Amino acid sequence: MNVRVRLFAVAKQLAGQDLIILQLPERTTLRQLREKLAAEVPQLAAVLPHILFAVGSEYANDSSLISADSEVACIPPVSGG
């Protein structure tokens, strides 16, 4: 299945793009997507443990299943003052 991963902020800067399409097997968890993303885009590996993900419009945890043609948002931590 194809899954669209939207990147924001530092993740977008590190990857050099704002959209990555990953080919994943059916019944993939967000944890497996995180691992595949680290393998496909090694520049993101250091920040991936700190990133929140949303599937569709809902925040998701590592055990959440991703359905075919899902859009996943990769939301890095932000800081500011």
Image (cartoon, rainbow, N blue to C red):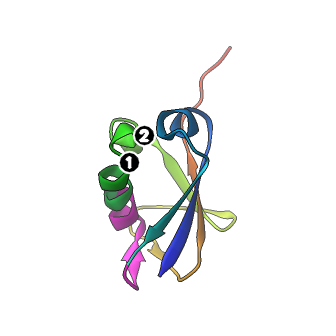
Q: Amino acid at mark 2?
A: His
Which residue is rendered at x = 47% and y = 82% of the image? 1
Horizontal and vertical percent position of residue 55:
59, 66
User: Closer to the N terminus: mark 2 or mark 1?
Assistant: 1
Asked if residue 52 is positioned above or below residue 64 in the image, the reply reads: above
Q: Amino acid at mark 1?
A: Val
Horizontal and vertical percent position of residue 18:
61, 47
Tally of numbered tags: 2
Determine whether the residue tagged by mark 1 lies in a helix, strand or loop.
loop
Horizontal and vertical percent position of residue 62:
40, 62
Say the numbered circle drawn on residue 41: 1
Residue 32 colored magenta?
Answer: yes
Q: Farthest residue to the top: give it.
A: 81
Quarter of the image where one finds residue 46: top left
Determine whether the residue tagged by mark 2 lies in a helix, strand or loop.
helix
The stretch in magenta equals 25-34
Given residues 57 and 7, the one toward you in this image is 7
Observer-side mark, 2 or 1, equals 1
Given residues 81 and 47, the one toward you in this image is 47
According to the picture, the residue beneath numbered tag 2 turns out to be 50
How far, Cα to Cα, is label 2 from label 1? 16 Å
Which residue is rendered at x = 48% and y = 34% of the image? 14
Circle 2: is it few (<14), some (14-19), or many (20+) Cα within 10 Å?
few
Say the numbered circle drawn on residue 66: none
Quarter of the image where one finds residue 76: top right
